Amino acid sequence: MTKVFKIANIFTGLLFAGIVNATAVDDLQMKYQTSGAAEFDAERGNTLWHKEFPDPDAAGKIRGCSLCHTSDLHARGKHARTGKVIEPMAPSVNTERLTDPKKIEKWFNRNCKWVIGRACTPQEKGDILQYLMTQ
């Protein structure tokens, strides 16, 4: 295989991964809009991602998306309780991110309840996805 052909294959793979990500996110955002969400905004998603919420289990401690996933979505994070490594959230460096709508919903359900103390609204989910897609 020639060097040019290898580079073309890599580029095609990266392009396809971006298309898959956009499709899964687009499908979910369309679903959220049919549930009453307005236009999605990456800045609102950024604000929510970096917002700190009081930890109901430990006075004086906080919870937030960036606590485990970090503020740099291109970097690995670490689970606050277990110490387990969390691969980067940025789809630009982790092509596995945002490709499976079922996984996206699963983690929204789990993490929103843990961080915010309730399920995220369709608007919040869409805004966070909009923010993540800019990374």
Image: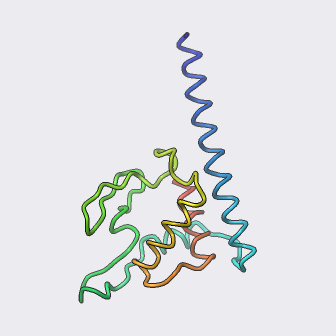
Pick whichever, 71 or 9, lies toward us.
9
Q: Nearer the viewer, residue 56 or 103?
A: 103
Q: Residue furthest right?
A: 34
User: Picture coordinates of residue 122 (x, y %)?
Assistant: 63, 76
Residue 2, image quadrant: top right
At 59% from the left and 80% from the top, the residue drawn is 121
The residue most toward the top is: 2
Percent from the top left, x then y, of residue 61? Answer: 26, 82
Vertically, is 60 above or below 130?
below
Q: How many numbered discs sit on the rendered protein?
A: 0
Q: Nearer the viewer, residue 45 or 88?
A: 88
Q: Is residue 51 left or right of residue 106?
A: left
Q: How is the image coloured?
A: rainbow
| Quarter of the figure with residue 54 | bottom left
Q: Is residue 16 left or right of residue 97?
A: right
Q: Position of residue 102 (x, y in %)?
A: 58, 61
Residue at 73%, 66% in the rendered image: 30
Residue at (48% x, 66% y) in the render: 107
In what quadrant of the picture does the N terminus appear? top right
Comparing 13 with 72, the one in front is 13
Q: Return the x and y of residue 3 as percentages of the image width and height.
A: 53, 13
Which residue sits at x=71%, y=78%? 35
Q: Is residue 22 above or below residue 13?
A: below
Q: In the image, is residue 18 above or below residue 84?
A: above
Residue 123 as seen in the image, left or right of residue 83:
right
